[in-house]
Structure formats: C-alpha cells, structure tokens
Image (spheres, helix red, strand yellow):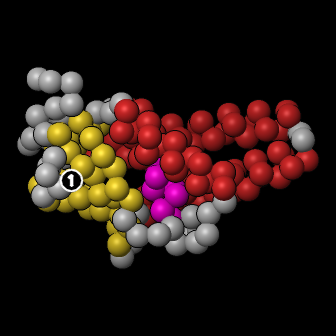
Amino acid sequence: MNETAGRLTRVVLEGEPLHRISPMQAADREQAVRDLQAENEFFPVSRPELQSILHLSLQEGRLIFAIHDADDTPVIAVMLALSPFKMLIKDYQMLLESYASAVAEGREAKIQAIDMGRRGLHNEGAELMMARLEGKVVIDFATARRLFTLVCALHQKL
C-alpha cells in the first residue's frame, strides 16, 4: 500500500458556517484542514485502499461525510445525526468565547485552564465521532479530533 492509500488527500467544507466566525475560529478551521491533509487515517470500511476527498457538510440537522475518490467522483456518503454532538459544540463555542475574553484581559492562568478544557472537549468529540462512524469509516483519534473542529466551525451556534 502506498503512503496515500487509505487516507484523505483533500478536505472540502461545503456551505458557509451558520454564523460569522471569529478570526481565531477561522484559524482553527484552517489549521485542522491543513493537519488533516498532511496526516490522517480515514477510509470507508469497504474500501481500505481508497485515496479519498472528503466533502464535509451540515444538511437538515445531519453531518454529511461525502467520500469521493481521487478523481472527485462520489463513492459513498455517510450521514450522522448532529444531535449527539450539539452539547459538545455548544460547550466548545462557550470555551472559545471565554478564551477570547481571557486573551483580551491578559489572564494567562485562565487561558491555560481554558486550553485544558478545549483539549478535553476535543477528546470527547473525537471519541463520539469515532463511535458514530464505527462500522462505516475507519478513523484514528487524531483525525477524529480534527474533524470535530471542522464540525464546530461549520455549526457555530446551536
């Protein structure tokens, strides 16, 4: 298997965020996309060799993972209900707002505490993402964390 088989080669976020996002949220989103494209484990259970392009979107209360082949031809779409993620997304949004306030106030101890909380929420979101995709898509923990960041970026306010 070559180094790009069984992984994402590109990530496309479809649709705009539901609300305007802050520069920090935009930077998080861009970093997650760059990190995903550089290193990931993500492929349909039925196609472990697939070099894929992921089109990620939110539609009618569902997360849509439209997995395309290297030529950007649709292969499979996996749809997940958004509702199990809503509380985590809401908590993540509140942490980002607290983080922005702490940075503006120059409160280093608060910034560090919020960063720890963010890591915890990312971990929880990654675990949920992996559980919801189980049996459909093979995904590693780091990839799931980054996808959770992108889901939060697509759906900022609940």
Placement of the N terminus among the 4 image quadrants: top left
Question: Magenta residues?
Answer: 148-155
Q: Residue at x 14, y 59 (%)?
A: 74
SS category of the residue bearing label 1: strand
Q: Is residue 58 magenta?
A: no
| 29 lies left or right of 20 | left
Give the amino acid type for the residue marked by disc 1 in the picture: Ile
Rendering quarter of residue 66: bottom left
- Please provide percent x and percent y for residue 108: 85, 34
Question: Crowdedness of circle 1 by 10 Å Cα count: few (<14), some, many (20+)?
Answer: many
Q: Tell me, yes or no, if residue 84 can be seen here.
A: yes
Q: Residue at x 76, y 33 (%)?
A: 112
Chief secondary structure of the magenta portion: helix
**As rendered, which of 74 and 61 lies closer to the eye?**
74
Q: Residue at x 83, y 52 (%)?
A: 101
- Which residue is situated farthest in the bottom direction here? 60
Spot occupied by residue 98 in the image (x, y as percentages of width and height): 77, 52
Query: Quadrant where the C terminus lies?
Result: bottom right
Q: Quadrant of residue 45?
A: top left
Position in image of residue 91 (x %, y %): 63, 54
Q: Residue at x 82, y 45 (%)?
A: 103
Is residue 91 in sight in this rendering?
A: no
Residue designated by label 1: 67
Is residue 87 shown left or right of residue 73? right
